[in-house]
Image (spheres, rainbow, N blue to C red):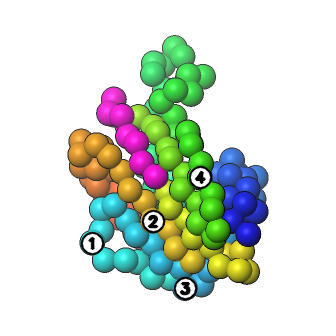
Amino acid sequence: MIHEVIKQWHAHMRGELANGLDVLLDDDVVFYSPIVYTPQVGKEITKLYLQAAGQTLPGESSSPQNTNDSSKRFRYTKEVLAGNTAVLEFETTIEGKYVNGVDIITCNDAGKIVEFRVMIRPLQAINLVHKQMGEMLERLNTPN
C-alpha cells in the first residue's frame, strides 16, 4: 500500500492531485514536527503544518539570472519503502543555508497517511525553518 500512497504524495507535491492532502491524510493523522515538541493530531492541523512547510521549504534559485537552477529547490533525493512506511530524504536551500531532512510517512491498510514525521538537519537549518514556519503558520492562521 505504501507504494501507491507515495506515488500519490509525489503527484500532490507536483500539484497534480486535486485536494491532495484531503485525499491522502487520515482524519486522525499524527504529525511530528521537527520544531514543535508535542505531536499534532488530526487532519486539519496536519494540513496546516504541511501547507506552511510547502511555503517555507520550496527553496530558492541560486541567482536571479538562473531561475531554472533546481539544485537549490526542494527535492527528494532518496526513497526507502517497506511495509506501510516510507522514508523520503529531501534537500533544499533557504536563505543560502543547506537544509537536509527526511519525511517518514506511515499509512494504514486503507491507503491513508496516519503518521507524518519530519526531521531536519543541520542546526542552522532547524533554527531557520523554526523562524520561517512560525511566521508562515501565523499568516495562515490569521483571517484576511
Q: CA distance from mark 1 to mark 2?
A: 12 Å
Q: Identify residue type, mark 1.
A: Tyr
Left or right: residue 42 versus residue 101 is right
Q: CA distance from mark 4 to mark 3?
A: 24 Å
Residue holding disc 4: 80
Residue 62: x, y in percent?
A: 45, 22
Residue holding disc 2: 117
Residue lying at 46% horizontally and 52% vertically, measured from the top left = 102
In the depicted view, which residue is nearer to us: 21 or 99? 99
Q: CA distance from mark 4 to mark 1?
A: 26 Å
**In the image, is residue 131 above or below residue 77?**
below
Residue 119: x, y in percent?
A: 38, 56
Residue 12: x, y in percent?
A: 68, 56
Residue holding disc 1: 37
Q: Secondary structure at mark 4?
A: strand
Residue 105: x, y in percent?
A: 55, 65
The part of the chain drawn in magenta is 94-102
Q: CA distance from mark 2 to mark 4?
A: 14 Å
